[in-house]
Amino acid sequence: QVQVVESGGGSVEPGGSLILSCVASGHPYSTYSMAWFRQVLGKEREGVAAIANDGRRAYGDSVKGRFTVSKDDAESTLYLQMNNLTPEDTAMYYCAIGFFLSLAPTSYNYWGEGTQVTVSS
């Protein structure tokens, strides 16, 4: 059974930082990409950052220079270091597993249930 579990969300003031984690298990891929998406109620899911099996990375324009995606292959864990957070970063953040490096939600087959990030003063 595929399990994708995010953690690390919470509330932070503008300018603050958070680190999100995602542990994945049970999926059928021997090589795979992992990604972070975020969604605000009533809006489309937005690709935040992705990392391929070979380490290539992709970032959404709104987070470039502020967010860093990384992974620990041995632990099948994905991370998202988020710095200089703004209220516009407030969203539910989701982790996903797929085959191709992409920021399109349709490229990913397995999803976690999300972790909430709230940025406010």
Image (tube, rainbow, N blue to C red):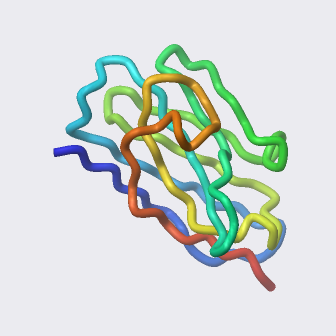
Q: Which residue appears at 74% of the width and 64% of the height?
A: 89
Q: Quadrant of the N terminus?
A: top left
Q: Which residue appears at 56% of the width and 19% of the height?
A: 55
Task: Return the x and y of residue 76 as percentages of the image width and height.
Answer: 34, 35
Task: Return the x and y of residue 94 as percentages of the image width and height.
Answer: 51, 56
Query: With 100 as the anchor, is 57 left or right in this view?
Result: right
Instruction: Say if 42 sits above or below 3 in the image.
Output: below
Task: Return the x and y of residue 64 as percentages of the image width and height.
Answer: 81, 41
The image quadrant of residue 27 is: top left
Q: Which residue appears at 24% of the width and 28% of the height?
A: 28
Give the tally of numbered discs. 0
Task: Return the x and y of residue 33 as percentages of the image width and height.
Answer: 48, 28
Along the line of sight, the residue nearer the viewer: 88 or 44: 44
Q: In the orientation shown, which residue stands out farthest toward the left?
A: 1
Q: In the orientation shown, which residue stands out farthest toward the top?
A: 54
Q: Quadrant of the C terminus?
A: bottom right
Q: Which residue appears at 52% of the width and 44% of the height?
A: 79
Query: With 63 as the anchor, is 105 left or right in this view?
Result: left
Along the line of sight, the residue nearer the viewer: 112 or 85: 112
Instruction: Say if 85 sits above or below 68 in the image.
Output: below
Query: With 115 as the anchor, is 26 left or right in this view?
Result: left
